[in-house]
Image (cartoon, helix red, strand yellow):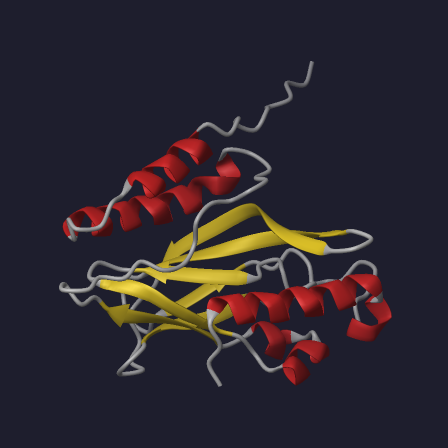
Amino acid sequence: MMLNIRTAKHLLLAIAVTCLGSAASCNLPDNPTINFEFTGQVLDFDTKQPIEGAYVLAIYEKVDLGFAASASYCIKTHGMFTGKGGDFNFPIDRLDGLSPGRVFAIKADYYYRTFEPVPPAVWKKNNKETYSNRHVYLKKQDPANPEFLGFSTCERPKSREAVDAAINYLQLMLVERKKYSKHKSDSVESFIKQMQSVPHEQTIIQR
């Protein structure tokens, strides 16, 4: 079953909040040793074939738990290009379903179509299976009706270095938007400038 990004995010947030509210229910150890990675493939939406040379962006999020509502937000990003098999892999910071949580991809003449979530029953296992073989789908652009879906910005980055991958992703998107000249690119340029203005990490000099 393939869900759209809004439905997928709501499902992910609901599960993450449940896990954070009761670690035992999601089998979260206090100091887990994570000996596997977040892995998957970028596939063509129509042919289901792997896509080489796609840039994949992983979003690492945290959740604010409020009395009346909860919200997730981005704190850092990682990025990489896929090889012949369309494969990607990213380190996992925490077994909370958000580190990373969302994954996007882009390639020349393609656009991000959807990120396929795993079923709730697999999420509850919270093990290697939960974070493996995740599929991101790209779709060929229709020059007469181009689409640009997916990532916007990283809301609360830890540092300028934490958003380098997001900037790379948006710069690739900007090239695509300018290629299809009917699409305005002001918002993408604004997001890039916003993240480029984030302060760099401070280096502590030992004396």
Depth order, front residue of 152/163: 152
Percent x, y of residue 172: 28, 49
59 or 139, nearer to the observer: 139
The percent position of residue 22, horizontal first and vertical second, equals: 84, 66
User: Quick check: 155 left or right of 93?
Assistant: left
The residue depicted at 30 percent of the width and 61 percent of the height is 54
Indicate the position of residue 140 as horizontal and vertical percent values: 22, 70
> Which quadrant would the C terminus be assigned to in this image?
top right
Asked if residue 17 is positioned above or below residue 162 in the image, the reply reads below
* Residue 52 horizontal side relative to residue 40, left or right: left
Residue 119: name its quadrant: bottom right
Q: Give the residue displayed 55% in from the left and 46% down from the top.
A: 76
Q: Position of residue 139 (x, y in %)?
A: 28, 71
The residue most toward the top is 207
- For residue 123, which quarter of the picture? bottom right
Q: Residue at x 39, y 55 (%)?
A: 80
